[in-house]
Image (cartoon, rainbow, N blue to C red):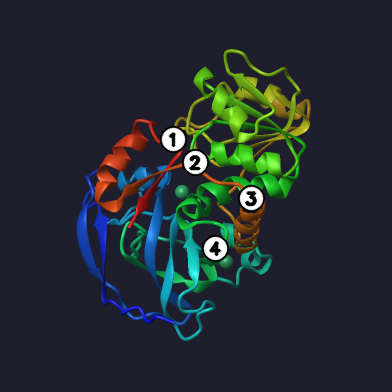
């Protein structure tokens, strides 16, 4: 087994102010805590959340900010209680760690632990870098038949859409938005046995929707019938006509958000009351859901559509994502 030299610092790209272009940034790697591992990164996906964090849109970014939370790499150093092995290929997503003693953690819902911490910001640096310190309990073994570039977007985009689809097990499912999340949601829903409809603003997405496995394609100008779906997964940060969207749901149907429309959602409560519809949200994935998702993607040949770019072109990659020109996920090669 080859021994990888252990560095004492990491070379990444950081925003030094809100909204600033990323610049090279070298930073010290502290000693590992018991459950931690040091990972040599090979690939990292670029997610919309990274753009919000760079811009401090959610008022919780700390600078210098090294973004990146769809990370794949190789374990090169272990903390004393680490649950991985040297040379393991692991994936790391949005959640750095959780408390492991609250009621949510005790019921294996680590993704909604109130004490969970993000992979970067608040004293940690993310995946647009050569190395990262991760919690081994939130680092996931990548199945052998999933190559690292395709595994990366599964760690956030994939888990975010897989978890609610697998949790609610609905039959007639609509996915709003065919982008970084939506193009994976269509594939997962189809492989989970759902009848899948894709809903987009853009008629030009029709061919992609069918290629990804959709059974039906609708636009908001040419919408589905009322009472069509058991479940609608909203993957877009866009303001829609929410009353119209709710009428697409059958009685007891569920509208689930994994996105954040910029101006909140406004609707007539009667569209919930009269048919007992539900509006809910889903946050990334628990440890178990993450492991299940990776195994399910590997077994069912679910792969993100990716464009690879070198990390040195991170600012061009960010521009491309901002212009919605990514088709559908950019993966940085470190
Ligand atoms: Zn993300
Ligand atoms: Zn907890």
Mark 1 beta carbon near ligand 1 (under 8 Å)? no
Is residue 98 among what the camera can see?
Answer: no
- Name the quadrant of the N terminus: bottom left
Q: Are marks 3 and 4 in contact (CB under 8 Å)?
A: no
Residue 140 image position (x, y, % from top left): 54, 65
Where does label 1 land, which residue? 327
Marks 3 and 2 sit apart, C-alpha to C-alpha, by 20 Å
Secondary structure beneath label 3: helix
Of residues 235 and 183, the one nearer the viewer is: 183
Marks 1 and 4 sit apart, C-alpha to C-alpha, by 23 Å
Q: At 33% across and 56% down in the image, what residue appears? A: 128
Ligand 2 quarter of the rendering: bottom right
Where does label 4 land, which residue? 142
Tell me if residue 226 comes above or below residue 313 in the rendering. Answer: above
Of residues 304 and 70, the one nearer the viewer is: 304
Dot 3 or dot 4, earlier in sequence: 4
Where does label 2 land, which residue? 305
């Amino acid at each position: 087994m080859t021994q990888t030299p252990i560095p004492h610092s990491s070379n990444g790209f950081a925003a030094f102010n809100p909204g600033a272009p990323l610049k090279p940034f070298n930073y010290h790697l502290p000693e590992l805590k018991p459950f931690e591992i040091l990972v040599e990164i090979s690939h990292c996906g670029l997610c919309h959340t990274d753009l919000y964090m760079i811009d401090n849109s959610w008022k919780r970014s700390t600078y210098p900010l090294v973004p990146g939370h769809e990370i794949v790499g190789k374990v090169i150093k272990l903390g004393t209680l680490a649950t991985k092995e040297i040379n393991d290929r692991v994936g790391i997503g949005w959640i750095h760690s959780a408390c492991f003693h609250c009621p949510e953690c005790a019921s294996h819902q680590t993704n909604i632990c109130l004490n969970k911490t993000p992979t970067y910001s608040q004293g940690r640096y993310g995946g647009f870098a050569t190395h990262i310190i991760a919690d081994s309990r939130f680092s996931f073994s990548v199945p052998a038949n999933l190559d690292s570039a395709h595994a990366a977007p599964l760690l956030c985009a994939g888990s975010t859409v897989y978890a609610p689809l697998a949790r609610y097990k609905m039959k007639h499912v609509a996915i709003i938005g065919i982008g970084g999340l939506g193009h994976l949601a269509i594939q997962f829903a189809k492989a989970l046995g759902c009848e899948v409809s894709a809903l987009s603003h853009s008629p030009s997405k029709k061919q992609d929707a069918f290629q990804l496995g959709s059974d039906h394609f609708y636009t908001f100008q040419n919408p589905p019938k009322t009472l069509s779906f058991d479940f609608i997964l909203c993957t877009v940060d866009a303001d829609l006509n929410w009353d119209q969207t709710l009428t697409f749901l059958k009685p007891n149907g569920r509208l689930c958000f994994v996105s954040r429309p910029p101006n909140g959602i406004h609707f007539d409560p009667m569209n919930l009351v009269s048919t007992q519809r539900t509006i809910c949200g889903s946050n990334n994935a628990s440890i178990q859901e993450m492991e299940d998702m990776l195994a399910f993607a590997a077994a069912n040949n679910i792969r993100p559509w990716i464009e690879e770019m070198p990390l040195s072109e991170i600012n061009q990659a960010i521009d491309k994502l901002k212009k919605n020109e990514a088709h559908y996920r950019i993966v940085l090669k470190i």
